[in-house]
Image (cartoon, helix red, strand yellow):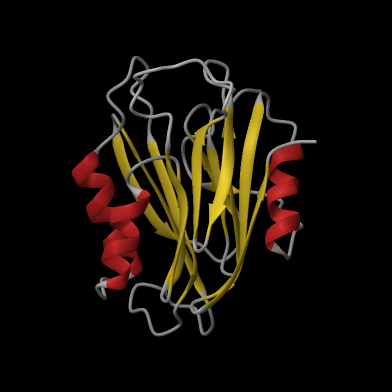
Amino acid sequence: MYVGRFVVVGPTVGAYRVSSRSFPNRQAVRRDDTVTVEPTPDAPETDNPYISYNGVRLTDRGAVVGNGSHVDPIAEKLELGYPARDALAQVLLSLDFEKDDYDTPRIAGIVGVDAADPTTAADGPGAVIGTVRRDALLVEEVTEPTLVATYEEDSPAAFDLAAESAESAAREVYDHEFEHAVCSAGVAGEAGDFDLSVYNGA
């Protein structure tokens, strides 16, 4: 099954995978507390605005994962003190689905949300996941690994993620049976103490 790009979000572990039939020449590059998805050196030139973006941003209040330019403003709102649910919902609603040929949904989640956050009920680290599609805006707290993808699996649903570390999360989602894997990133930990990893295939 081809589900396009997808995120998996849980209270202490999460991941993002780029899956693509049209633009496979991309890589995940870690830069300090950020993972950037960008073209490989041999990629053909394109003016597509959705090809390169930050797919993961770490903050002191949670780790943001997502499939586009909305990752940065979500992280910035977290850093300004917005509750996790509100940061996710406001940015997704503001930017809306991608205006491409497929009305591609924007998907995002926040891993390791600070336990003091008023929008999560968890005693320890919490997690929030969301998507904005042409027909819906969905944002919800999750207590177990949950997936949302741009196609087919475009509503949050439980996902069997065994990984406990950032490195194993990145590798596990890359190796998942969903088709056309390109690159991935994994994050593990909680607010203020995250590990981050990328995987670009063998």
Taking the spot 49% from the left edge, 63% from the top edge, the residue there is: 33
Quadrant where the N terminus sits is top right
Where residue 194 appears, as percent x and y from the top left, is 57, 71
Which image quadrant is residue 193 in? bottom right
Residue 142 shows up from this direction: yes
Query: Does 181 appear above or below 89?
Result: above
Picture coordinates of residue 200, whole percent (x, y):
69, 39
Residue 34 percent across, percent down from the top left: 48, 57
Q: Quadrant of residue 17?
A: top right
Does 97 appear above or below 166?
above
Which residue is situated farthest in the left direction here?
94
Against 25, is 78 above or below?
A: below
Of the 4 image quadrants, the one containing the C terminus is top right
Left or right of residue 39: residue 181: right
Count of number-bearing discs: 0
Camera-side residue of 165 and 28 = 28
Q: Residue at x 57, y 29 (%)?
A: 40
Residue found 39% across the figure and 40% down from its top: 68
Which residue is farthest right?
Answer: 202
- Of 193 and 7, nearer the camera is 193
Is 49 displayed left or right of 55 in the figure?
Answer: left
Is residue 88 visible in the rendered image? The answer is: no
Q: Is residue 111 left or right of residue 130?
A: right
Residue 124 % position (x, y): 54, 82
The quadrant holding residue 106 is top left
